[in-house]
Image: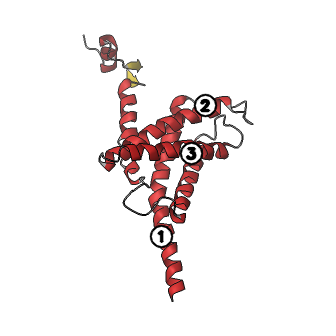
Amino acid sequence: MRLNFGLHCQMEGLGFKTMNGNLHHSRLRCLGFLAVLFLSAVSLKANPFNPASSPIFEFGTITSITLAILAEAGCIMLLLRRWRTPRWFLLWLMAMHLVTYPIFLGLLWLSSGKPPVLSVAVGEGLIVLIEGGLIYLMCRFAPSAKAEMPLPSVSKSLLASLAGNVCSAVAFPLLMMLVGWIAFSIESAISD
């Protein structure tokens, strides 16, 4: 007697659930999501903290960080537009970063002896989990103008957080280059 793979795994207690013989919401898929979360190659470019270089409190660095966080918040708002979100959701997301960004920098500082690739990837992964949980809690407990809309699930909140952090990680180096180019143009115009 021939069993299909999903039914065989379910009978063996491997944790796979089937729906019409197809794999559906398996633990393997969850592990794949976590692997992408922690080992994302894009997040390796998101390290604004380098103790050997210039200070982090320069105008160009703060401007780039702020604009990258704004891009992240916009991405999260776009992904959760069909779900119940609090009033002033953009401000809630920006205020959330007043907590999570120092945590990210603290994680980078604590892992300064480790390889930078590993420390940034683990820091980004933990921040995605923290921000996803905070987004879920904001949508669940903060007063909403769209009370009739359904709540986003934890997985949708984590996915929105992951997409927002990828957007921020892509935007940050581009914004740093743009701000550097603007500063160079201003300095060259002044010196001429």
Q: Which residue is painted at 75% across and 36% down in the image?
A: 145
Percent coordinates x, y for residue 182 in the rendering = 52, 73
Q: Secondary structure at mark 2?
A: helix
| Residue type, label 1 | Gly
Q: Which mark is residue 137?
A: 2
Q: Which residue is mark 3?
A: 97
Label 3: few (<14), some or many (≥20) within 10 Å?
some
**Can the viewer see residue 40?**
no
Percent coordinates x, y for residue 115 in the rendering = 29, 47
Q: Which residue is painted at 50% across and 86% down in the image?
A: 191
| Residue type, label 2 | Leu
> Can you tell which quarter of the image residue 170 is in?
bottom left
Considering depth in this image, is 135 or 145 the residue closer to the camera? Answer: 135
Establish if 192 lies above or below 132. Answer: below
Could you tell me how many numbered marks the image carries?
3
Closer to the chain start, of discs 3 and 2, is 3
Q: Are marks 3 and 2 in contact (CB under 8 Å)?
A: no
Considering depth in this image, is 148 or 172 the residue closer to the camera? Answer: 172
Q: Which residue is mark 1?
A: 180
Closer to the chain start, of discs 2 and 1, is 2
Q: Which mark is residue 189?
A: none
| Residue type, label 3 | His
Q: Secondary structure at mark 1?
A: helix
Q: CA distance from mark 2 to mark 1?
A: 38 Å
Q: Which residue is painted at 65% across and 42% down in the image?
A: 92
> Can you tell which quarter of the image residue 31 is in?
top left
Q: Give the mark toward the camera: 3 or 2.
A: 3
Establish if 150 lies above or below 164. Answer: above
